[in-house]
Image: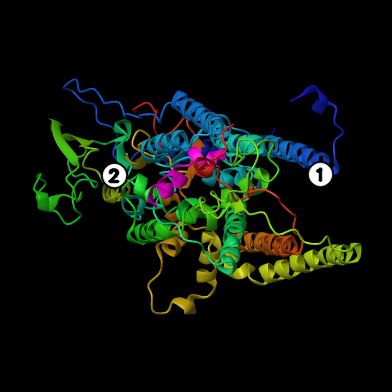
Amino acid sequence: MKPSEKHKPMNRRAFLRAGVQVSIALGIGGMGVLAVRRSGTEKLVWQLDPAKCTQCGRCATHCVKNPSAVKSVHVYAMCGYCNLCGGYFRPETKTLNTGAENQLCPTKAIKRTFIEDPFYEYTIDENLCIGCGKCVKGCGAFGNGSLQLQVRQNLCDNCNQCSIARNCPSEAWSRIPANTPYLLKGYGKEPS
Amino acid sequence: MKKHQITGLIVFFLLLGWHVAAQVIQRFPRPDFESGYVTPETLQPGARAGFLELVDLLVLIAAISVTSWAVLKRRSRLLVFWISMFSLAYFGFYREGCVCSIGSIQNVTLAIFSGGYRIPLTVLAFFLIPLVFTLAFGRTFCAGVCPFGALQDLVSFKPLKLDYRINAALDIIPYLYLGLAVLYAATGTDFIICRYDPFVGIFRINATVGMFVFAGILLLSGIFIARPYCRFLCPYGVILNWISRFSWKHLTITPSVCVQCRLCEDSCPYEAIVKPGPWKNPESRRTMVRKFLSGVVLIPVFIFLGGWTGSLLHESLARVNGKVRLAEELLYPAKRLQSPETKELIAFKASGKPAQELYVEATEILNRFYTGGWILGGFIGLAIGAFLLGKLFSRHRTDYEPNRGACFSCARCIDYCPVQS
């Protein structure tokens, strides 16, 4: 800018422009402040509350990831280690062996390991689990409810609007603080 | 204290204790293992590390800064193109399109209108930073940073000119989209920008058939109509458009003085170059005043008509909301005689929540939609009114200039200008 231009009087158009620019700048700043003041800031992740979950099966079908980022999570501390496991066997099963026709899981994601008579440990293979919640339903109906559906945060894309949350019929989904990213029921309780 | 009171208290606490214990008691108590079995820990892997989001933010700032420099100082289309390819790779395919500035409109809206939601600072920054840069340098965000723009720029092989009437009609869609997105985000219903995001399915290679077809249509039509999403859908573009009109600096076609060579005339695939019009005789003061007054009267009329239409439509608009839909289904079971109960209805009945509570909630949401319908309609009315008013007044231009609102600052026109600085 030449020195002669520096002191040129401002014309009306330039003055109005400057006014609008300042107003927009204030508006942008104000919007940011308003958003923070009204709600506060925090990093959030999606999670579902097992206490509200009805195992409708949509977690398996509505996630943008395939297979779903929702997995059946085993809270070992709650498990009864039963031989007749409601999450492992189909309800009408007669012989309690690992035959595929006896298993509830459609992908054989639950592994059953003998520990000592008559107890078995159940482990979820998360590479196979599709999050359909069949085992969760079975465990909740006949057992302790130690199998629970949870978003695996390391697998979740954390979409701005979770596709499962939108379709959840039970209002079980919400955004929760990222530093406590799980909502496991009964977790951390001392085994009695 | 009387004896029976004490007994009563003891009974009360016993009951309370039993009640609490009953909740903890498991059907099958954890066995006492004799083989020394150790209960495995339930793993709880965390989300993406926080510092990586800071990296996203720094990449965003760096990409807009470099694009602005490339457009305004370096004046190089090639550089802008390669930055946009980088952004396509980073924000598109690596970050899989989430979170983006377009979608962040909804987060900010939700943060302002709904309690209980806390907006992540990164998301807020993704919303605000492009606005600040646009106020300073024009829509350089659209040119070099937005992965949607980059993807569509890749396919615009043979841009055609659109009829101005079609153009004007399509120009209204982004306003409608923005208004609806804000309405649905403010009522906590849905994030429709994310839901109908055509390109995220391509970035993630997991689009549903419907969205894949939508993206295909956009990209195919994008061969002939450059950047169809940006021009005729993008809700963030509406905000950027209006800010860019008042930007402090902006891309110029010529580095110094326009020589009226007309070489740049057809260079813009987005028809965002304003041609110098023939010098019209300045209108008389009388006509100017009449035009101005008609605007003063017409715009409120448009706002009112729009708002009224919006308020009439509020029930249809609210039907997108899950709670409203559920309440309707519960109230009018006759409507779904043929179809079986939805999972929502089954889950609601299983939850044991009283229906009255749901109706109260749904009514409240419906009321919000009524207010929202007025505001949305008024906003559309204002947009149409402002567009018509803009048609009444024309400003004489002597040079070829970018239309500051519509220009994406892609810098294509620069290569056509023969003037060297």
User: Residue B3: in sight, yes or no?
Assistant: no
Label 2: how many residues lie within 10 Å, few (<14), some (14-19) or many (20+)?
Answer: many
B73 or B383: nearer the eye? Answer: B73
Query: At numbered mark 2, what does the secondary structure look like: helix, strand or loop?
Result: loop
Q: Is residue A144 above or below residue A62?
A: above
Per the rendered image, the range of residues in magenta is B140-155
Q: Which residue has dot 2 on it? A: A143
- Indicate the amino acid at tag 1: Arg
| Chain at numbered mark 2 | A
Q: Count how many numbered circles sit on residues in the image.
A: 2
Label 1: how many residues lie within 10 Å, few (<14), some (14-19) or many (20+)?
Answer: few
- Residue B152: x %, y % from top left: 42, 50
B273 or A149: nearer the eye? Answer: B273
Q: Which residue has dot 1 on it? A: A13
Residue at (57% x, 32% y) in the render: B121
Q: Is residue B167 above or below residue B231?
A: below
Quarter of the image for residue B47 reads top left
Q: Residue furthest right?
A: B286
